[in-house]
Image (spheres, rainbow, N blue to C red):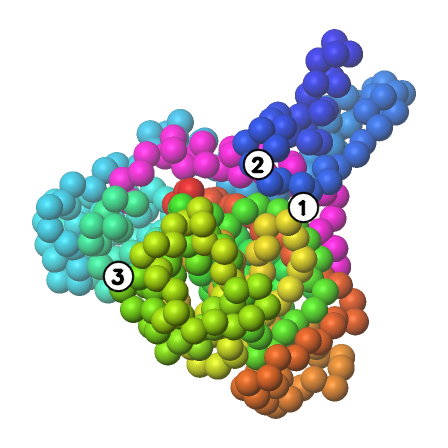
Amino acid sequence: LTDTYFQLADHLVTGRLEPSQVEEYWKLKPRQIDLVGNLQQAVVKRDILASLSALSSPHAGYARLRQALSDYRQLAANGGWPAVNSTEKLELGSRGVAVQQLRARLRASGDLSGPDAVDPAYFDAILQDAVVHFQERHGLTTDGVVGPNTLRTLNVPIAQRIRAMELNLERWRWLPETLGERYIEVNIPGYQLRLVEQGEDKLKARVIVGRSKRPTPIFSADMSYLVFSPYWYVPRTIMVEDKLPILRKNPYALRKQGIRIFSGNREIDPGSVNWSNVSKRSFSYSMRQDPGKYNALGDIKFMFPNQHSVYIHDTSSPRLFERDQRAFSSGCVRIDSPVELAEYLLRDTKWDRDTIVKASQRGRERRVDLQTKVPVYMLYWTSWVDSDGTVQFRDDIY
């Protein structure tokens, strides 16, 4: 029994799996608990169950997700939700059996509430609002129309949702006791950044993350400085895989984007090299993009030195933030509101919004150190529960 207690207690504290076995770059320090002392106190108090319950993750997000998991398991025991069978999109004004199925599906998951419709086969405004609510909590376009993506998501089995909840509860167990009084969290599959202070969201922003072939790693590091009007030092992978083919077609194409090419410390004329004779392996050059409107990092970058050379930055392609699925980068995280993030991080200094905007558009690189380092967590949540109780799901993009 003692061994069983220790095993169960260890699973509650640090999870059933070793993080590094499933998440290559997971380097967060797990919680440390005196299991022997905990058992001794439980024996004295004659309350083993209470001692085990106290070992659960202290994070509010864990408790909310655990309650949601219990609710979903009960829903599954009651039969789950019905499938929606439709070969055409369903929208305001649609009519038929598929609309009735849609009503039953959304009512089962709590997206549709209130009294039954007078005409359940008719797609009315109330049903449209329910579809929007469903789309919001699944990261879909909130147009109130059941097209292919929404239909596919509606028909995900409840067992798959339950499994996602269980996996994300495990990720909660891998986290340290506290994330800090102030920290930044990037949810990779949620395409969202949160700046949290004393448990409250002070800033939420949309982000673009790494694509499947160049994924954003899961790790944590401390943000220590910002750079306005940054240079972009092009990573080798991007140089040989993305830029070299461009140079072979037109050696001066990159110059139009403000990208300079160097051999050692000496800038070279790109037309002086026969790029067709340069292979990925023999490529011995470096590239640097000047600050400006074409700069891939935009006007600001936020630095938290780490082994992956990953950081948060602005972008020269803001239109991509309008997409629902935003895995487009080469690993770094692009943010849609860099000025707002910089303003909050520098709020107790001389750097007000106007000063930040001027520095970011000056075209001359400038580094500004933070007075206090801010922990940054790159995490991977495919299921979570908002503080208002809304259960969220996202696709596993990697």
Horizontal side of residue 142 vs 262, given as left or right? left
Foreground of the two, 304 or 18: 304
Mark 1 vs 2, N-terminal side: 2
Seen at 67% across and 86% down, the residue is: 352
Foreground of the two, 193 or 161: 193
Residue 24: assigned label? 2
Foreground of the two, 47 or 146: 146
Highlighted range, magenta = 154-183
Q: Work out how far the residue at label 1 is from the one at label 2, CA to CA, in angstroms.
A: 24 Å
Label 1: which secondary element: loop
Seen at 33% across and 72% down, the residue is: 253
Q: Is residue 207 above or below residue 315?
A: above
Q: Is residue 14 above or below residue 322?
A: above
The residue at which mark 3 appears reads as 144
**How would you rate the neighbour count of disc 2 (Cα within 10 Å): few for under 14, some for 14-19, many for 20 or more?**
few
Asked whether the viewer can see residue 327, the reply is: no
Mark 2 vs 3, N-terminal side: 2
Q: Quadrant of residue 108?
A: top left
Does 162 appear in magenta? Answer: yes
Q: Quadrant of residue 125?
A: bottom left
Seen at 64% across and 64% down, the residue is: 303
Q: Which of label 2 and label 3 is nearer to you? A: 2
Seen at 74% across and 43% down, the residue is: 177
